[in-house]
Amino acid sequence: MNFKNIFWYFDKALPSKLCDDIIKHGNSKKEELALTGAQGEKKENQLTEKELMDLKKKRDSNIVWLNDHWIYKEIHPYVQQANKSAGWNFEWDWSESCQFTKYKLNQHYGWHQDAGTEPYEEKAGSNFTGKLRKLSVAINLSDETEYEGGDLEFDSSTPEKIKNIITPNNGKSKGTVVVFPSSVWHRVKPVTKGTKYSLVIWCCGKPFK
């Protein structure tokens, strides 16, 4: 798909205290190594040494899964506004668990898309059955003085033809909410100092017609 706007952002949208509350909440839970692709069905201790090395070349971060109503309540209005203002007008009706992410020194996430090629398979009691990721949300929870690097970047083409389209203000302002179609290529560059905390949410809906 080609989009006139490959992202829509709200600078410093979330109050500092709310960001701090999410960080405190996320840090109170046990973190795990972020996985990707086929490895996503495994646990960290199930990966071979080679699988772990290959993973960290592509993605290296620590995550915690959150599904608290008070978080969605704060974020969803921005998703709805961005969906309309950017002209995407995607139909979506559910969000996956929030991914609270810690990017420590040298941690990163290489070029990737969030959208899958096929709808979620049928699972008993699942709200995702037959749905796709349509919109992604990335929220910077950290103050820009607390870390260096970790820039969120977007590209309107593919990793083979990178144009390095960077989010305004690099999305570094605390509380900035960035919404984008889940099929858009993006990455998080390595953190070179401190720790960057972020929150990612994927909004799902039935396949495009």
Image: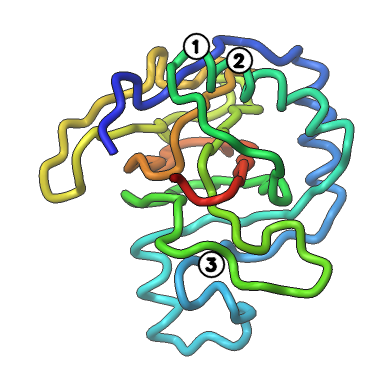
**Real-space Cα separation, disc 1 to disc 2, in angstroms:** 6 Å
**What number is the disc on residue 35?**
3
- In the drawing, what numbered circle is on residue 81? 2
Neighbor class of circle 2 (other Cα within 10 Å; few <14, some 14-19, many 20+) is: some
Amino acid type at circle 3 is: Leu
Query: Secondary structure beneath disc 1?
Result: helix
Residue 132 on image: x %, y %: 54, 53
Q: Is residue 52 above or below residue 109?
A: below
Q: Position of residue 182 (x, y in %)?
A: 45, 42
Q: Position of residue 71 (x, y in %)?
A: 81, 32
- Most distant residue in the left direction: 161
Say what secondary structure mark 3 lies in. Answer: loop
Q: Residue at x 29, y 20 (%)?
A: 4
**Any mark on residue 100, and which?**
none
Quarter of the image where the N terminus is located: top left
Whether residue 38 is situated above or below residue 187 in the rendered picture: below
Q: CA distance from mark 3 to mark 2?
A: 30 Å
Residue 208: image location, x then y, percent: 45, 45
Mark 1 in CB contact with mark 2 (< 8 angstroms): yes
Q: Nearer the viewer, residue 118 or 156?
A: 118
